[in-house]
Image (spheres, rainbow, N blue to C red):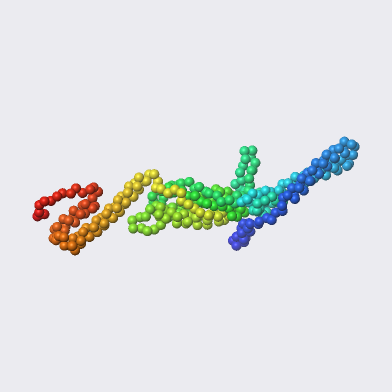
């Protein structure tokens, strides 16, 4: 078998067959009638044997037993589906079909529901083999990864998802919830390694902190590609936690504070220079006072000290000459 034939077989297995099952009410009534008739026949058979009619009593016992067995088998084909639920059925190991419409149905009583992640009760019996089609949330707890610059950061995200093809969900993967969780962890780690936590000097690239929504959209697209074969649709991915790891958080905070202080000082100096320039122009235009180069330099120095200083200036009255 070549690769093309293998792919064709794989696609046939993954193709979903939606069952158009019969209503279960008619079969329920028929099953109850068979059970009642079987019990009645069983009872009359015993009565006939007690009266000496061994042949007729034996026939009634056999017929009653058959009716009870048939009625019990027919009852096994009754299925109840709630809204936003599906059940994948197999017949003797082969995929039989999928029920996706809510209601009360009757199917082949020999089919079995398959769901690798069905719940197990305390007595060891399965309690639910149905696949939920409701929108669910995967809370990916925060994990420590290295960003593009090698800095350890903590990042956490949630994925909003739902099952759109229950056949693929239960056939193509062993445990679709665990599969989704592992793929989500992998996508978050790989994506976080491609981008820095914050903008570097002179950089304008995407960052985990500044472009969180764009990064989340990239995660969503990559995760959807990974879980497509599991019949899962990723509706949204959101980053819920993002911070430097504790071992470097203090150092990075000091770095951010220093960068903020430098930016603030730069703005103050730019504003102070503009104000000094405006003051000199106004004095020159209005001919309030004529300043030589030395006086201009002294005035500029004093104004910059006043405007750029952290503390309020203490004025000093000069009653004498500058020279």
Looking at the figure, which quarter contains the C terminus? Answer: bottom left
Q: For this rendering, which residue is in front, 213 or 8?
A: 213
Q: Residue at x 77, y 48 (%)?
A: 30
Name, please, the residue furthest toward the top: 50
Picture quadrant where residue 285 is located: bottom left
Q: Residue at x 18, y 49 (%)?
A: 315
Q: For this rendering, which residue is in front, 82 or 237?
A: 82
* Percent x, y of residue 44: 85, 40
Question: Is residue 140 visible in the rendered structure shown here?
Answer: yes
* Percent x, y of residue 262: 29, 52
* Percent x, y of residue 1: 62, 60
Name, please, the residue furthest toward the bottom: 285
Q: For this rendering, which residue is in front, 176 or 315?
A: 315
- How many numbered circles does the render carry? 0
Q: Residue at x 39, y 44 (%)?
A: 246
* Percent x, y of residue 222: 50, 56
Q: Residue at x 83, y 44 (%)?
A: 63
Question: Is residue 172 visible in the rendered structure shown here?
Answer: no
Does residue 4 lie above or below 304 as drawn? below
Does residue 126 lie above or below 2 as drawn? above
Q: On the picture, is 61 further left or further right than 129?
A: right
């Amino acid at each position: 078998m070549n690769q093309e034939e293998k792919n064709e077989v794989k696609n046939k297995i993954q193709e979903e067959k939606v069952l158009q099952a019969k209503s279960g009410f008619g079969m329920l009534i028929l099953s109850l009638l068979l059970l009642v008739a079987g019990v009645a026949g069983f009872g009359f058979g015993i009565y006939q044997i007690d009266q000496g009619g061994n042949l007729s009593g034996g026939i009634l016992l056999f017929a009653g037993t058959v009716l009870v067995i048939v009625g019990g088998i027919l009852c096994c084909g009754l299925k109840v589906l709630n809204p936003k639920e599906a059940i994948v059925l197999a017949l003797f190991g082969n995929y039989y079909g999928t029920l996706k419409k809510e209601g009360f149905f009757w199917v082949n009583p020999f089919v079995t529901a398959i769901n690798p992640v069905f719940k197990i009760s305390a007595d060891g019996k399965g309690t639910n083999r149905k696949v939920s089609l409701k929108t669910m949330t995967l809370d990916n707890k925060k994990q420590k990864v290295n960003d593009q610059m090698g800095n350890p950061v903590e990042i956490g995200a949630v994925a909003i998802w739902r099952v759109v093809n229950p056949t693929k969900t239960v056939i193509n993967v062993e445990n679709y919830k665990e599969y989704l969780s592992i793929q989500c962890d992998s996508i978050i780690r790989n994506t976080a390694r491609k981008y820095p936590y914050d903008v570097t000097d002179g950089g304008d690239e995407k960052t985990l902190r500044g472009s969180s929504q764009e990064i989340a959209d990239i995660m969503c697209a990559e995760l959807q590609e990974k879980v497509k074969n599991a019949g899962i649709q990723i509706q949204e991915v959101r980053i819920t936690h993002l911070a430097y790891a504790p071992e470097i958080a203090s150092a990075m905070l000091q770095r951010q504070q220093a960068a903020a202080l430098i930016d603030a000082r730069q703005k103050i100096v730019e504003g102070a220079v503009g104000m000094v320039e405006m003051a000199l122009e106004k004095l020159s235009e209005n001919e309030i006072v004529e300043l030589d180069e030395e006086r201009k330099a002294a005035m500029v120095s004093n104004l910059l000290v006043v405007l750029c200083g952290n503390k309020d200036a203490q004025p000093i009255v000069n009653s004498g000459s500058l020279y």
